[in-house]
Structures are given as C-alpha cells and as structure tokens.
C-alpha cells in the first residue's frame, strides 16, 4: 500500500467532487460504544455515484476502505484506522412507499423505517423499531429481534461492488442466516434496499411497536454507551444451554469489569462503557467471559459484535487477537 497522508486523501477526494470529508476523524464519535481512535479520513457520501468514486479511488491506490452505518454493532480499535471510512447515513436516506413495498436508501435510520411502515399500514417491521442502526447495517447483519431477521422482508438489494460498479442482488443471493449474510466480507457496499411487508392495521402495528420499545426500556441498559447484544443467541443455543444473558448472569459475571468496560448490571449480554473504556478493555472482558463460561458449562460463546482492526478488517470480536 502506498503511504498516503490524511491531507493527501482529503485533497484528492475533494478534487473528485466529494464535499463531506473529515481528516483524522475520531471513530469514538461514530460508535455506540464511544470507543476508537482516529480514522485517516471519514467520508459521508451524498449519492451512489460518490460511493462509486470513493471505492474506485481506494482501490486504485490500495487503501483500506471500511463502510459503516451508525457504528451500533462495531468495536473500533484504540489505534483507529489507517485508510478511509465511508459512513453511509443521513445523506443517503431517502424513502419511497408503493403499496406494501418500501424502497429505502441504506443510510435510513431503522426506527424511521419502522415508523414509516406503521403509518402506511405495512406489517412485518414491528420487531426492528428499537434497533439503533441504519438500513444498510441491518441488512448486512440480518438484524432483527424476537428471533426474526430483516432478510425475510428483503426483495432486492442494490450494491456498489469492490470494483466500484453498481449491481443488484435478490434475497436468495444475499444468503441470509441468523444475524449474518453473504454481504458480510464481500467487499460490496449496500446503497439501497427494497422490502415488502404484509397488509396490516396502523393502530395495531403501533401498539406492538410501543410494547416492544417498553420491553427494551425495561431490560436494556439505558444511559451507558453499549453496542447491544455482545454474544450471539441462536435457536440451537437456546435449546441446549439457554440465552447468553442468562448463562453469563448464572456464571456470576454481572458487574464484572476490566478497565472501564463492565458487564451490564441490567442485562448480562451487554457490555457498557463506564467512561473512557478502550477496545483492549472490551476485548479482554469478552475473553474473560468466554473463558469463565467455557470452564463452567463447556460452551463456546460467539460474538455478534464486530471488531474493526486498524487496517479495516472486520471480524466477530471473539476472533480478534486477545490483548
Ligand atoms: C442499544 C442497542 C440495541 C440493539 N438491538 C439490536 C437488536 O435488537 N437486534 C439486532 O439485530 N441488533 C441490535 N443492535 C445492534 C445493531 O444496532 C444492529 O446490528 C444494526 O443493524 C447495525 O447497524 P449500523 O448501521 O449501526 O451498522 P454498523 O455497526 O455501522 O456496521 C455493522 C456491519 O455492517 C457493515 N455495514 C454497515 N453499513 C453498511 C452498508 N451500507 N453496506 C455494507 N456494509 C455495511 C459494517 O461494515 C459492519 O460490518 C443493537 C445495538 C444497540 C446499541
């Protein structure tokens, strides 16, 4: 890889017409955990053609490129990232509804999508109303709750591939599985999604959404920064050993901490940042939880949360090198 300074990347991309560029951008400001050092350059594209431009530029110069949404499922490294972070957010967040079909820009805020579906009387989106991410991140993670995933509602996904060309994929081609999809690690960036729900009744959908939000408020940590569920909770795991929150709680780990990272006292499948936690603290705490659970019940917990290394590699946090 050529050595490029932040200033050089910023100047090159400004010359190619990109406008929202931040050099040495602290990633902690783009992560729900509020953890992470600086990225050389953070770009917020306003159109699909800008996404293509950034992908082609990074590829031409061999620069690491990471796409993020809200960073609500990501642990950035304390060293940050040597390369470009492409943040797909508000500037790519348009929404169109026709019948029971919804076409959404990848940067749309998930609760906003759920509310738009409710207002249009489209059912099926109730379980995503409390998920604080973008539509792109949700589709890539096949996120959802109540054991459902957004993949069930996807009709087609438009992407910019690793060469910077536009393409579209059917639901089958996306290969959705429990909290995963073929889009992960493919190098493709999601820019638009078409979804289809069921005919529903607006007031009933609203009641279900409010019930979901109430339940979340009662169960999840409210104020301390966190990244949602740290460990995967699959159906097979439920059947054999139970949900991760219960396993971790029964292992006596509620409130356990390393540095400023702490197992939430409200819900043991959450790790909260008590102020100034580092990625090392979180990785060490994840390793500790996994070891205690393995010794206690012989079960290997796997992470839903993704760790981002300083070269832009993304992996389940349990696969990161333990400090
Ligand atoms: C309080 C809280 C509650 C949560 N509850 C839930 C829940 O109930 N269910 C659930 O499934 N998740 C939950 N999460 C986790 C998280 O919100 C979801 O995984 C969400 O879908 C991630 O979206 P994001 O935009 O933040 O993605 P990010 O965290 O920014 O990225 C996640 C992954 O997707 C990739 N990515 C992001 N955008 C794109 C794109 N446009 N194209 C290609 N790749 C992309 C990233 O590279 C990364 O690998 C919760 C998180 C928090 C903080």
Image (tube, rainbow, N blue to C red):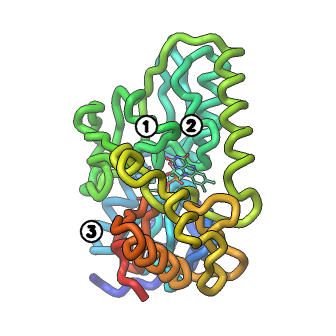
Determine the residue positioned at 43% across, 71% down: 293
Q: SS for tag 3?
A: helix
Helix, strand or loop status at disc 2: helix
Mark 2 residue crowding within 10 angstroms, few (<14) / some (14–19) / many (20+): many
User: Does residue 16 appear left or right of residue 265 in this picture?
Assistant: left
Q: Mark 1 points at which residue?
A: 149
Q: Which-is-in-front pick, marks 3 and 2?
A: 2
Residue 208 vertical position relative to residue 322 in the rendered view, above or below: above
Label 3 Cα crowd, 10 Å radius (few <14 / some 14-19 / many 20+): few
| The disc label shown at residue 128, or none | 2
**Residue on which the image places disc 3:** 60
- The Cα–Cα distance between marks 1 and 2, rounded to whole angstroms, is 9 Å
Q: In the image, residue 160 lies at what x, y percent?
A: 33, 48
Q: Nearer the viewer, residue 232 or 132?
A: 232
Q: Is mark 2 within 8 Å of ligand 1?
A: yes
**Residue labelled 1 has its Cβ within 8 Å of some atom of ligand 1:** yes
Tell me the mark number nearer the camera, choosing from 1 and 3: 1
């Amino acid at each position: 890889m050529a050595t490029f300074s932040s200033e050089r990347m910023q100047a090159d991309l400004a010359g190619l017409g990109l406008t929202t560029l931040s050099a040495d951008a602290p990633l902690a400001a783009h992560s729900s955990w509020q953890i992470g050092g600086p990225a050389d350059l953070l770009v917020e594209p306003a159109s699909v053609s800008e996404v293509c431009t950034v992908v082609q530029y990074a590829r031409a110069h061999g620069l690491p490129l990471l796409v993020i949404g809200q960073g609500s499922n990501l642990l950035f490294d304390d060293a940050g990232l040597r390369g470009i972070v492409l943040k797909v957010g508000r500037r790519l967040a348009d929404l169109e509804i026709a019948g029971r079909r919804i076409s959404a820009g990848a940067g749309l805020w998930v609760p906003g999508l759920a509310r738009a579906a409710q207002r249009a009387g489209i059912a099926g989106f109730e379980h995503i109303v409390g998920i604080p991410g973008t539509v792109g991140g949700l589709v890539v993670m096949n996120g959802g709750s109540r054991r459902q995933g957004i993949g069930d509602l996807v009709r087609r996904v438009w992407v910019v591939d690793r060469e910077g060309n536009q393409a579209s994929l059917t639901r089958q081609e996306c290969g959705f599985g429990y909290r995963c999809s073929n889009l992960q690690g493919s190098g493709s960036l999601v820019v638009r999604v078409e979804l289809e729900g069921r005919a529903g009744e607006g007031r009933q959908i609203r009641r279900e959404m409010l019930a979901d939000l109430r339940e979340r408020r009662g169960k999840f940590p409210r104020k301390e920064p966190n990244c949602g569920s740290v460990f995967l909770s699959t159906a097979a795991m439920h059947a054999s050993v139970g949900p991760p929150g219960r396993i971790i709680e029964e292992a006596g780990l509620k409130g356990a901490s390393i540095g400023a990272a702490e197992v939430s006292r409200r819900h043991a499948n959450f790790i909260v940042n008590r102020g100034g936690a580092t990625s090392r603290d979180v990785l060490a705490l994840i390793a500790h939880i996994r070891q205690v659970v393995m010794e206690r019940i012989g079960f290997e917990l796997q992470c839903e949360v993704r760790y981002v290394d300083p070269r832009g590699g993304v992996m389940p946090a349990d696969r990161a090198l333990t400090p």
